[in-house]
Amino acid sequence: MARVVVDVMLKPEILDPQGQAVQRALPRLGFEGVTEVRQGKRFELEVAEPLDEVALARVREMAETFLANTVIEDFTVRVEEPVQRETAGGQGAGAPA
Amino acid sequence: MARVVVDVMLKPEILDPQGQAVQRALPRLGFEGVTEVRQGKRFELEVAEPLDEVALARVREMAETFLANTVIEDFTVRVEEPVQRETAGGQGAGAPA
């Protein structure tokens, strides 16, 4: 089983009201220094077949025709090793010890 | 300017109806071999200050208190180099030539 991640973000030239709402809220919560926030979607696909170029091309096709609205969105497709996620208070593998 | 990406996904034990809806639709669209789909949110934060450990800890705090609902969601925080995105039909840097 391989995990393929498809990230879908609005194209840079498209207004992102959700991202702007988050950005405006951050200073009110005491968080300074963030000049821009963009919000998009992340899809994690568990792909059963061996993950060769044909399978990756199929995932790219899924992204282009179904997961992303390519009129207003761009996407990236990448294979990802399962990452240990951070839970509230816990130190994830990615975090400094 | 540095880009920090916060990925927010439902905890594995939490039902993901959106992901299931996508997964059920894929075979109808002719896409086989995807055994599971999880859908979450991706935040791209452009951070102005020099990106040291203190700044990263602040972003983790933002994620924990605001971007993720840590009762039902986990998150990952990572620094990302700007990636060239794939647009419809175009070959992104990530894609094989």
Image: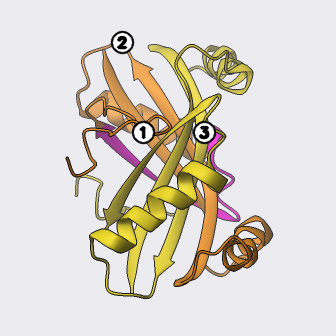
Chain colours: A orange, B yellow
Find disc 3 in the rendering and name its residue.
Answer: B40
Residue at 30% in and 37% down: A80
Please report, as a chain letter, where disc 3 is located: B
Find disc 1 in the rendering and name its residue.
Answer: A5
Q: Quadrant of residue A82?
A: top left
**Same-chain status of marks 2 and 1:** yes
Q: Circle 3 — which element? A: strand
**Is B79 or B96 nearer to us in this picture?**
B79
For the record, the magenta segment spans: A66-79
> Does the magenta portion include A73?
yes
Q: Quadrant of the C terminus of chain B?
A: bottom left
* Relative height, residue B28 to residue A36 (above, below): above
Q: Quadrant of the N terminus of chain B?
A: bottom left
Find disc 2 in the rendering and name its residue.
Answer: A48
Identify the mark nearer the N-term, 2 or 1. Answer: 1
Relative image position of residue B47 (x, y in whole percent): 45, 80
Mark nearest the camera among 3 and 1 is: 3
Q: Circle 1 — which element? A: strand
Q: What is the spatial separation of the Cα atoms under label 3 and label 1, in whole angstroms?
A: 11 Å
Q: Left of A90 or right of it: where is A33?
A: right
